[in-house]
Image: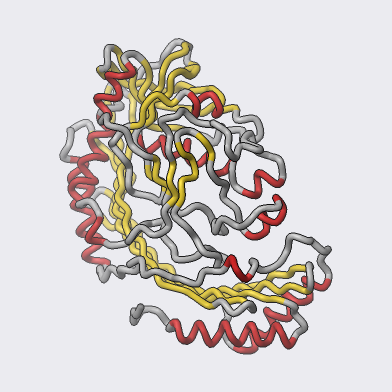
Amino acid sequence: MSDARFSYSQDDFQRIARFVLDHAKAAGASAVDTEVSEGFGQTVTVRKSEIETVEYNKDKGVGVTVYMGNRKGHASTSDLSDAALKATVEKAATIARHTAEDEAAGLPNQDWLATERPELDLFHPWDISVEQAAEMAKVCEAAAFAVDKRIENSEGASVSTQASHFIYANSLGFMGGYAGSRHSISAAVIAAENGAMQRDYWYSSARDANDLQSAEHIGRVAGERTVRRLNGRKLDTRTCPVVFEAPVAISLLNSFVGAVSGGSLYRKSSFLLDSLGQTIFSPIVTLREDPFITKGLGSCPFDNEGVKVAARDVVKNGVVQGYFLSTYSARKLGMQSTGNAGGSHNLLLQPGELDLPSLLRKMGTGLLVTEMLGQGANMVTGDYSRGAAGFWVENGEIQYPVEEITIAGNLKDMYKGILAIGKDVDRRGSKQTGSILVNRMTVAGN
């Protein structure tokens, strides 16, 4: 890893980490860990062919966690001078001395730490100037406006590039880090007809700018998605099947991850308590976690605590095979860390054979959801209720757009009611799924 725009090298970060560890031990710490990081980025936004904003971000920081037996203290600083690092360590140590004991607190077990660290090709800096980014954003926005004369306004098109690197180290002897990048192009436009307006958007995101969809494609899709929503209707309240379009189907995975993550489980604030080994989903559902995908947006050689990660089936044929646990939550549950401090890594829902039009034909009559509003999932009970918009489908064909509706059910019923998963996989994030057909939900409208 090398990039002239970074102010510090990995060697610099290793020196800082060793300094922090040594000073913490001298301050009486029984254990300590630290993360040293730096990042920078640029975002250029164009609206109506004029540059609206140019944003730069550049930051650095050191976080220190000190343990005094089972007492824990944490402090951080953005000043990387020796004096500031010493003061930060001493602050963390002081906090630890005055904190209540917690038997689950502490570094990972030595044998949990990663010893192999594969190269995953995560760093692809994008040398794009403000002028080049602005021109690309203009092309993207123009492609959206060209879709239809009814597109009359824009929320803007943006081109963003971000890069960062870090070192994590602890007093067990672990030290490791790497650089990463993430770039994106996006557009959102507004169409109007008969006094009513609709908006929609599209984007592409990747670690390597060469893997982004073209600016023209992103703008065209944003325009097409906006126009098709014009003249939306309300529905009468009913019960019917629902297809979640791939970009919104990802939210169903988010709810599952939240429910089987350690914090929710040990606090007993999850509707999926004791679900390990239980059939929670339809038997067609297999969900795999793979941290080792080259250029993957959720890829990593180790988790935020230096613990080894592994490719595994989290759900297989509908049965939950594993949780998402950090060191702390694993100890609270009497289990072993799954290498998920910091979250999940590249979740892939196994796709079926049907594209979206075929999925709609399989549904017959029902609702296609393309946008959801609000955070209406109760993680304690599984009750689910969210504002939605999309399209009414009859005989497998889209009939008209719908808006101002609410879809409701219970996540347990929804997971078991999955009838099909599309092959139209949305690959723009660390959670990837095709569209999902659920057998029945309540659609509330008029």
- Along the viewing direction, whichever of 77 and 439 lies nearer the viewer: 439
- Along the viewing direction, whichever of 431 and 60 lies nearer the viewer: 431
Colouring chosen for the image of the structure: secondary structure
Q: Position of residue 395 (x, y in %)?
A: 27, 12
Residue at 28% across, 68% down? 126
Q: Position of residue 218 (x, y in %)?
A: 24, 46
Q: Specify whether residue 398 is in view.
A: yes
Q: Position of residue 159 (x, y in %)?
A: 30, 57
Q: Which quadrant of the figure has residue 85?
A: bottom right
Quarter of the figure that contains the N terminus: bottom left
Q: Is residue 323 left or right of residue 160?
A: right
- Along the viewing direction, whichever of 309 and 164 lies nearer the viewer: 309
Residue at 37% across, 65% down? 162
Residue at 58% across, 80% down? 79
Task: Answer above or below: position of 272 versus 219.
Answer: above
Q: Which quadrant of the figure has residue 340?
A: bottom right
Task: Answer above or below: position of 202 versus 71.
Answer: above
Q: Is residue 217 left or right of residue 411?
A: left
Q: Position of residue 50 (x, y in %)?
A: 25, 55
Residue at 32% across, 23% down? 195
Task: Answer above or below: position of 389 versus 393.
Answer: below
- Along the viewing direction, whichever of 276 and 149 lies nearer the viewer: 276
Q: Specify whether residue 58 is in view.
A: no
